[in-house]
Image (cartoon, rainbow, N blue to C red):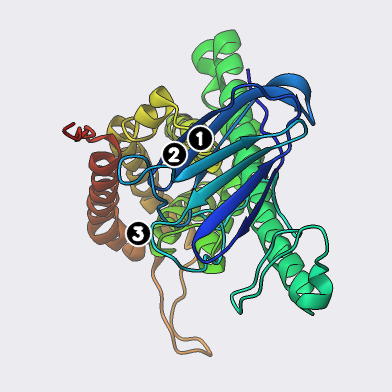
Amino acid sequence: MVVPSPFVYWAQTEGAISLKIDLKNVQKPNVNVVENKLKFSAQGIGAHGDTHYQFSLDLFCPVKTSETSENVTTVRVFDNRVDLILQKEKPSWWPRLTAQPQKPAWLKINFDLWKSEDGGDSDEDKRDVMKDYPGMYDQLQKEEMGYRKEDLKKVYLILYNLFQFVGYMYIMTVMTVRYVKLDYESVHDTYEHVGPAMKFLQLMMYLEVMHPLFGYTRGSALVPFLQVSGRSFVLFAMIEAEPRMQAKPVVFYLFLVWSMIEIVRYPYYISQLYKKEIGLLTWLRYTIWIPLYPIGIVCESTVILRNIPYFEETGKFTTSLPNEWNFAFHMPTFMRIYLLFLTFPGLYLVMGHMYKLRIKKLKPKVVIKKSQ
C-alpha cells in the first residue's frame, strides 16, 4: 500500500529552513532529522482525506540535530497545518531544498515567507512579495518549470523502459507459447514470427546511446554504443541480410538470450527511476549476465561464422576493383577480423565493466555505529 505525501511548502533564511505541512487535525506528528535526512509521518486530513501521511527529504546540506545541539528542530502543530523549523549546520543560501535536482510533485515554495539572498525581513500579514522583490516571482516560477522539466525527463525514461520491457516480454511470450505448442518445430521459423518486433526494439535501443549525450542519464555513451551496434550488426547485417540464416536454430537461442537479459534490465531501470531498491531484481540485474553474456556471444559468433560461406557465395556487401571509387571491401574477410579482434576482446571489456558494477552494487554494506 502506497502511503500518500502531504503538500509541503518551504522557505529559507540564511540560517534556517521552514516547512509548512498542509495537514489538518494532526495530533502527534513523528519527525526524525538526521544530518541531511528528514522523515515525517502523521495522521491527519489532507489532499487524500483523513489518513496516514508521510514523506522523506534528502536535504541539500546537513542541518543541526539533537546530537550536536538542543532545540534545533522546532515543531509547531496548528489546527490547519504543521510547521517545522530546521537550523542549518552552516549558514548559507541553498539553491534548492533537496539534494537531487528532481523536485517531488508535492513540494512547493512558500511565497509568503520567501526571502532573497539580498536580505530584508518578512511580515506574513503585510508583506507583498511581488512589490518587495520585482521579478522574484517569475524567477521562482522558472525554477518550478525547471523542476517540471526534470519530471518530464523521468516520465519519458519510465515510458521508454516500460515500452522496451513490454516489447521483449512479447517476444519471449510468443517464442515460449510456440515452443510449448509445436516443440522443436517452432525453432526454425522464429525469425518469421518475432523478427520484425526484434528489429524495431533494436533500433529503439539507439535512444539509450543518446540519453547520456542529452543528460537524461549518467555515464558514458561509448559502452551502450558498442553494445547496441554489436547487436545491430548481427541482427541486420548477418541475419536480416541472409535469408538462409533466418531459419537456423541459433537464431532462436540468440533471441531467447537477448530477451532474458532485457526483461530484467528494463524493470530494474524503472525501479531506479522511482528510487525503489528491490533486492531480487537488483541481484538478477547484476548476476544474470554471468551465464547469459557468454552464451549470447557464442550465439552471435556462430551466426557470423556460419554466414562466411554464404557471403563468399553471394558477394553481398563486397566491393571489388575496379570501380569509380577505387575502393575494395571483402565482407567475409571483415567478418573473420570481427570475430578475431572484436568479439572476444569485446566480451572481455563488457564483462569486465559489468563485473565492476556488480562488485560496487552488491558488495556488503558496512554499517558504522556511533558510540554513545
- Residue at horizontal 70 percent and vertical 54 percent from the top: 152
- Residue at horizontal 62 percent and vertical 47 percent from the top: 19
Which residue lies under the disc numbered 3?
Answer: 335
Query: What is the secondary structure assignment of the residue under circle 3?
Result: helix
How far is the residue under mark 1 from the one under mark 3? 58 Å
Q: Estimate how packed mark 3 is, as few (under 14), some (14 to 19) or many (20 or more) residues with alpha carbons within 10 Å.
A: some
In the image, which is nearer the foreground, mark 1 or mark 3? 1
**Foreground of the two, 224 or 323:** 224
Residue 70, image x and y in percent? 38, 42
Comes first in the chain, label 1 or label 3: 1
Residue 207, image x and y in percent? 58, 57
Which residue lies under the disc numbered 1?
Answer: 39
Residue 73, image x and y in percent? 48, 43
Disc 1 marks a residue whose amino acid type is Lys
**Foreground of the two, 356 or 315:** 356
Circles 1 and 2, Cβ within 8 Å, touching? The answer is yes
